[in-house]
Image (spheres, rainbow, N blue to C red):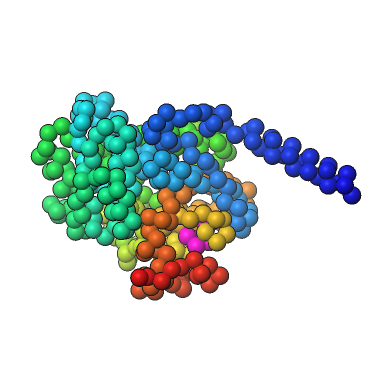
Amino acid sequence: MMLFHRQKLEKVLISFSRTYSNISHESLQIRDGFSGMVGRTPLVRLQKVSEETRCNILAKAEFCNGGGSVKDRAALYLIKDAEKKGLLKAGGTVVEGTAGNTGIGLAHICLALGYKCALFLPNTQSKEKFDMLQLLGVELFPVPAVALTDPNHYNQQAKRYALSIENAVWTDQFDNQANRLAHLETTGPEIWRETKGKVDAVTFSTGTGGTFSGVSIYLKEQNPHVQSILADPPGSVVYNWFKHGKLERSVGDSITEGIGQGRITGNMQGAPVDDALLISDNETVEMVFRLLGEEGFFVGASSGLNVAAAVKVAKKLGPGHTIVTCLCDTGQRYYAKLFSEAELKKRGLYEAVPEQYRHFLHSRI
């Protein structure tokens, strides 16, 4: 009996050793400062949904970036782009209109590189994001959430403010294709390398469109048969544009933040889109709590939407396929809203939380 257990243990240790030796040497290198903490995030196989669909559903763990979200990649490239163009000098100010995560990434990088940071945010964003930005020393301008055509839109105000002060740059995350380039040069190649080129489809939600377009362009350059599937929340025009050619908002609004759009951004123009999916908030919320209760990942709503879309794509393609998406950030940034029993009941989303996972909810104070 002892011999059997020892042999079994030896097999486990050999298996672990082989797995560990397959970890990229690049990922084990010492990284240089905060900028070195952007990118090269783990690609994780989501076990339960992979078993359920008999596919490999893989997700880039983007909350492992230094600033805690996928937007750190865009933030770094936006600042480096401004530096290369001579638009930003030592001690200058980076100005952006943001729903939160790009701003957090910009704030971290500004601290690391010696710049000041000023951000305009819609006042509908989570308290946790505002608290984080204040902690990071940002000059913060919460403004009403209005249409882009309104001169009081947060992006319009950011642009005007940057023009009004010396040595400042508006990084223009929605239309500045340095955002797309970040994913064309980092996220896309990482996915291709980590899957050894065995990827059948990618699916991402879009805010600025940088992640979706950059990854899709890169992967299709490697293999034109890789399918790029756009995932959209209620209240956005992006789904209807790519499915029906109409800039019409889908019905309803969404609990998600930072995704969905009222226009086709500069970063999304020309992006290869094979199909688009409209993911309801019920599907998103259900997946957020499944990811927590079944996989152990505490993530935000955009991550839940991404994985819900990946499951739909997997079921459509059939067993044996590999679908890649991303876990954008952590659930802590939405704790007071997304994980509140009272808030979910108010929005009619409480029943979307699987009953066995409702103990994760907190009572709203």
At which x and y percent is residue 133? 29, 48
Q: Please tell me which residue is depicted at 37% across the width and 63% down the height of the picture.
A: 336
Asked whether 244 or 251 is in front, the reply is 251
Q: Please tell me which residue is depicted at 78% across the width and 43% down the height of the picture.
A: 9
Quick check: is 63 in the magenta stretch?
A: no
Asked whether 112 or 327 is in front, the reply is 112
Q: Which residues are magenta?
A: 287-291
At which x and y percent is residue 29? 51, 28
Q: Please tell me which residue is depicted at 36% across the width and 34% down the height of the picture.
A: 181
Q: Is residue 264 visible?
A: no
Q: Please tell me which residue is depicted at 19% across the width and 51% down the height of the picture.
A: 141
Numbered marks: total: 0
At which x and y percent is residue 335? 39, 61
Magenta stretch: dominant SS? helix
**3 w.r.t. 143: above or below:** above
**253 w.r.t. 320: above or below:** below
Q: Is residue 44 visible?
A: yes
At which x and y percent is residue 58? 54, 47
The quarter of the image holding the C terminus is bottom left
